[in-house]
Each structure stands twice: as C-alpha cells, then as structure tokens.
Image (cartoon, rainbow, N blue to C red):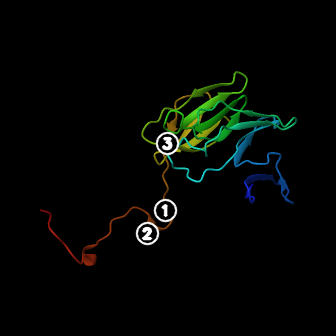
Amino acid sequence: VRAPTPLSDQLWTVSLKGGTPTQFAVPRAVDGKFSPDNKRFVFEEISVWEDEFRNYRGGQNSPLRIIDLQTFAVEKMPWENSRDMNPVWFENQIYFLSDRDFGMNIWVYDTPTKQVKQVTFFKDFDCKSLEGNNGLLIFENGGYLYKLKVGSDKPEKLSITVNGEFPWTRPHWTKVDKNIDAISLSP
C-alpha cells in the first residue's frame, strides 16, 4: 500500500487477513518488490512529478535501491542519471525499466555479479508499466501489451480482442442515410 506523508511517499504493509496497516521498514519509497526469499527489497526512493518527460536527466532521477531487511543495509544499483523504475525481482535478477539508452526499455541487474544488461531495444515508443510473475514479464509499448519470458530477449506482442456483450456494441452495419444533415464535395 502506498500512502503519502507530509514529506515523502511511504509504503505500508497490510495482513492478508485484514487489520491495521503498519509502516514498512523503508522510510521513503514509492514502488518496490521483495526478493524471492523475502530477505531483501528493491525500491524506487522518490516519485517523479512527470512520468512522460522523455530523457529527463534532472534531480528527480535516482537509482533503484536494495535494502537488506535484516541488517537494513542499503545498496544502490548501478545508475547513469537515468529514470529507473518498476523493478521486478526473479531469482537473482532484477528487471526494471530504464531510459539509459534514451528510450525507455527493459534492463536486468544480476545481483551476484552486479552487472546491468539491456533486454529490449524498442526505438519508436517507450516501454511502460513493467510487472511480472511466474517467470513472465508483461509491459506496454506503443499501445500494445507484450509478454517476455525471463531470460529471453524476444518480447511477444499479445493479440487481445474485446467483444461487446450487448448487440449494439458488436460490429454491425447500420443505415445512416436518415442521419445525414450536411454534405460537401472534395476539391
């Protein structure tokens, strides 16, 4: 749960059984994910006021951070003054969105080797809203949803069809000659 405080954003935890939320161990965080063993947590420290500012290199950018939830030691992930966001943790790797190639793409950070590698190479549109589960990432690019298997560098565009339940929302032909109230000829 994300709740604003007077000075910064703060994460809270809530039991699946309900009850009173408790303040999370990280005093300032916006978005994050637990490691598979729940001993560490990767997070964004600050929220930005403008998500769509492409290639912004100002003071709102900050590196993703990893906190050890037993010692509370914090490690900054490698960073190039880029906008790094939406971390997703699989085994020893953290996938995240970054504009370090001047387009928002998916990158991966290997926690044992501390190496960062680019995974996707989209040029026309930025990747957005990275999430993942069960070895599969999902994200948006250019208005389309893509899935990407962890360890692969070949995203697959999803084909989604939404059919209307009511007859008038389904594709159909309609006579509109009675609705025409003006016409004009092209040059």
**In front: mark 2 or mark 3?**
3
Question: Nearer the N terminus, badge 2 or badge 3?
Answer: 3
Q: Do we see residue 171 in this rendering? A: yes
Could you say which disc has been placed on residue 147 in the image?
Answer: none
User: Closer to the observer: label 1 or label 3?
Assistant: 3
Disc 3 residue type (three-letter): Asp
* Figure quadrant of the C terminus: bottom left
Looking at the picture, does residue 25 appear above or below residue 66?
A: below
Corner quadrant of residue 87 = top right
Q: Residue at x 28, y 77 (%)?
A: 179
- Residues 78 and 147: in front is 78
Residue 88 appears at what percent x and percent y?
Answer: 67, 38
Q: Earlier in the sequence, mark 1 or mark 3?
A: 3
Q: Is residue 132 visible?
A: no
Question: Which kind of residue does numbered mark 1 sit on?
Answer: Gly
Q: Residues within 10 Å of mark 3 (few under 14, many from 20)?
A: many
Classify mark 3: helix, strand or loop.
loop
Q: Which residue is mark 3?
A: 126
Q: Which residue is situated farthest in the front direction here?
A: 59
For label 2, the residue is: 168
Provide residue 109's location: percent of width, then percent of height: 65, 29
Location of residue 19 with respect to 82 vertically, above or below: below
Q: Secondary structure at mark 1?
A: loop
Q: Quadrant of the N terminus?
A: bottom right
Q: Residues within 10 Å of mark 2 (few under 14, many from 20)?
A: few
Q: CA distance from mark 1 to mark 2?
A: 8 Å
Task: Residue type at mark 2: give it.
Answer: Trp
Instruction: Give yes or no for contact between labels 1 and 2 (Cβ–Cβ under 8 Å).
Output: yes
Any mark on residue 164, and which?
1
